[in-house]
Image (cartoon, grey):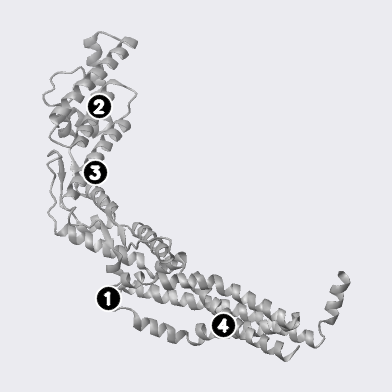
């Protein structure tokens, strides 16, 4: 090999060190710090979701404690709202799973912004569903529905109907299966005696009485509950329908009857809870700002990051290709596979040592500097996540550098072995196989 070719090969080997070392760092960064799934995992392991969930809990508790929640005028007095245990309601309404799902969605949105896939940055999560869950929690914990009195309200002023509706009978039917059977059997016996029918004629008469009573119930209940919400009217009507069906159809069991009534009680409770939450709607924000949680300057930092991030994306693509180009040029200059392997191997070893220097030797310094650079107002979990992210980057860089070191050392070893003739027999056998 001529002196010029040797000098050229050395220059290309130096360039190869630069591109390979750069590619090592760029691909490491791209697969860790700039990989949303990697970041999400670090957030989870650092307890960010748990801490954020506690923060939302605290805000909801404060809002509930500062509010005076009473029964809405859109539900009748038979639906009462008791004293609210703010901490219990918040615990039921705000789950870590909900916060984690919403936070991860936001992380993915942020990465789309960083990589140029989205033009807008959104650092907030929608907590509107939390309001709905607060209503459900209030309904479960504090709302009481007096079904018997509500049935009386719905049937008030209705007069005589083929199937009599009364809260007292409904109360007895709900009390126990024995009472249920007694009330329904007494009605059917009285109905059969008064109608003078039996068998199929009795069934037909009961069916007709059922439909006629339901028609009257529907019209009367709508009038009696017109001042309340439509959901109140619907639930009150369905409770009476359940009673009519139980009295006229002997196939309806006690369990089926109570299930229908309890379903409507639950619906009324949820309605009362929903209306109760409306009283504090303006106190609870629809969106939770993550920049307030993660640190005061977080949004500003992210807004300035797309440029550098996209440059790293480009480097992670271009630098490996340049490395391959330099390997090809070394071969063009030397016209020797052995020399190409040697120069390439040496370059890979040097690149690997640079990566290991950063990842292993300077690990303590990097972590110490990162820890001191964390904003004072940043939550502990976020700080732990950042440090965990850095450890992950350094760990990945170490692994990739070790791989480069092994490959580089292997190439150098093969080149030296070939120069000393140790591979002649191997090459001869390969030639024979051809």
Tell which circle, 3 or 2, labels the residue nearer the N-terminal end. 2
Disc 4 secondary structure class:
helix
Q: Quadrant of the N terminus?
A: bottom right
Q: What's the CA distance linking mark 1 and mark 3?
A: 39 Å
Q: Estimate the x, y position of residue 258 in percent, counting from the top left.
A: 28, 34
* Identity of the residue drawn at 81% across and 82% down: 423
Disc 3 secondary structure class:
helix
Tell which circle, 1 or 4, labels the residue nearer the N-terminal end. 4
The residue to which callout 2 is attached is 241
Rate crowding at label 3 as few (under 14), some (14 to 19) or many (20 or more) other CA atoms within 10 Å: many
Q: Quadrant of the C terminus?
A: bottom right
Label at residue 122 = none
Q: Quadrant location of residue 6? A: bottom right
Q: What's the CA distance linking mark 3 and mark 4?
A: 65 Å
Foreground label between 1 and 4: 4
In the displayed structure, would residue 300 be above or below residue 200?
A: below
Foreground label between 3 and 4: 4
């Amino acid at each position: 090999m001529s002196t010029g070719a040797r000098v050229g090969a050395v220059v290309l080997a130096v360039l190869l060190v630069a591109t390979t070392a750069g590619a090592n760092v760029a691909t490491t960064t791209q697969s860790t710090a700039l990989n949303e799934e990697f970041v999400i995992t670090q957030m989870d392991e650092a307890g960010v979701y748990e801490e954020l969930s506690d923060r939302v809990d605290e805000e909801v508790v404060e809002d509930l404690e500062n509010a005076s929640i009473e029964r809405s005028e859109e539900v009748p007095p038979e639906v009462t709202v008791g004293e609210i245990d703010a901490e219990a309601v918040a615990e039921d309404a705000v789950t870590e799973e909900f916060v984690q799902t919403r936070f991860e969605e936001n992380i993915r949105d942020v990465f789309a912004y960083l990589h140029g896939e989205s033009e807008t940055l959104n650092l907030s999560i929608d907590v509107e569903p939390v309001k709905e869950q607060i209503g459900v929690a209030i309904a479960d914990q504090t709302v009481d529905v007096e079904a018997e009195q509500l049935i009386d309200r719905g049937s008030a002023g209705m007069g005589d109907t083929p199937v009599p509706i009364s809260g007292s009978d409904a109360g007895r039917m709900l009390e126990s299966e024995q009472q249920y059977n007694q009330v329904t059997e007494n009605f059917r016996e009285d109905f059969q005696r008064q109608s003078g029918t039996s068998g199929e004629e009795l069934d037909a008469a009961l069916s007709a009485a059922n439909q006629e009573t339901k028609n009257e119930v529907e019209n009367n209940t709508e009038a009696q509950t017109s001042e309340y919400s439509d959901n109140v009217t619907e639930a009150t009507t369905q409770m009476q329908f359940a009673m009519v069906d139980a009295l006229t159809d002997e196939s309806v069991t006690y369990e089926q009857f109570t299930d229908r009534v309890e379903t409507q009680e639950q619906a009324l409770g949820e309605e009362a809870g929903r209306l109760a939450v409306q009283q504090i709607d303006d106190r609870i924000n629809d969106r939770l700002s993550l920049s307030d949680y993660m640190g005061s300057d977080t949004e500003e930092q992210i807004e300035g990051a797309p440029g550098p991030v996209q440059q790293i994306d480009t480097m992670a693509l271009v630098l490996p290709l340049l490395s391959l180009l330099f390997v090809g040029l070394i071969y063009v200059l030397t016209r020797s596979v052995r020399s190409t392997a040697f120069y390439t191997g040496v370059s890979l070893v040097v690149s690997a040592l640079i990566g290991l220097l950063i990842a292993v030797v300077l690990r303590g310094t990097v972590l110490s500097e990162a820890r001191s650079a964390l904003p004072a107002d940043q939550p502990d979990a976020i700080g732990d996540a950042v440090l965990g992210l850095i450890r992950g980057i350094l760990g990945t860089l170490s692994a990739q550098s070790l791989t480069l070191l092994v490959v580089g050392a292997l190439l150098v070893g093969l080149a030296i072995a070939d120069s000393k003739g140790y591979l002649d027999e191997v090459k001869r056998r390969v030639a024979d196989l051809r």
